[in-house]
Image (cartoon, grey):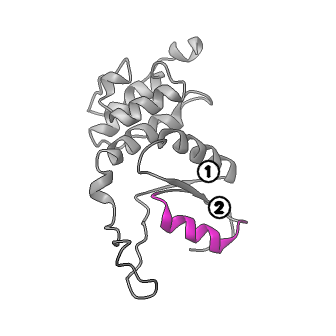
Amino acid sequence: MLRIACINVTQEGNVRIAPVRTFKDAGIHPAMLDNVGLAGYGAPTPIQQYTLPAIKKGYDIVACAQTGSGKTAAFLIPILSNLMGKAKKLTAPRPNPATFEKGVTPGVRAEPLVLIICPSRELATQIFNEARRFCYRTMLRPSVIYGGGPIRDQVCYLFINVLACRETDSDTDW
């Protein structure tokens, strides 16, 4: 971790982002802050120090960093934190269990709120596992979809969960 903390960051463009030094300073949702701690993150890495405030302010970013520098958390933390603040507003109304009649009462299904597209099944699985850690004890449910898996099951996961990671290196068209 000490080597990563020493990495220099170069910003390009007209806008300069002030880095955050702690996750508390990043203004993330309290549930996300708890999950970041439970996941073992102590302090933000250099890439996280700049991307957390940039994404929170709505800027688009392009970032390059070495393996193990915290790139996945750098984009997942602010995106999921933002959704956590809106989770109740984004949820579909649930039918009343006392009056629900199967086949008569319209069903309810979730729709993806975020779609992350990545080049390989391994990376999709890595992002999914990290998203699961950050969504712990929240209303958000990640899922992963990739080629070679049962299509029916994956489409079902897509409509019952709110975050999807998809790899692009497959023969699956949808």
Label of residue 124 in the image: 1
Sequence-first disc among 2 and 1: 1
Percent x, y for residue 166? 58, 58
Q: Which residues are magenta?
A: 148-162
Q: Residues within 10 Å of mark 1 (few under 14, many from 20)?
A: many
Q: Which mark is residue 146?
A: 2
Residue 45 is one of the magenta-drawn residues = no
- Image position of 144 with respect to 28: above or below: below
Name the one closer to the observer, 96 or 160.
96
Q: Is residue 172 visible?
A: no
Alpha-carbon neighbours of circle 2 within 10 Å: few (<14), some, or many (≥20)?
A: many
Whether 159 is among the magenta residues is yes
Image quarter (top left, top right, bottom left or bottom right) of the N terminus: top right
- The CA distance from mark 2 to mark 1 is 8 Å
Check whether the beta carbons of the residues at disc 2 and disc 1 lie within 8 A of each other. Answer: yes
Q: Secondary structure at mark 1?
A: helix
Q: Residue at x 34, y 23 (%)?
A: 24
Q: Does the magenta stretch mainly form a helix, a strand or a loop?
A: helix
- Res 88 quadrant in image: bottom left
Outermost residue, front side: 98
Q: Is residue 19 above or below residue 113?
A: above
Image height of 45 relative to 167, above or below: above
Residue type at the position of mark 1: Ala
Q: Nearer the viewer, residue 117 or 33?
A: 33
Does dot 2 land on a helix, a strand or a loop? Answer: loop
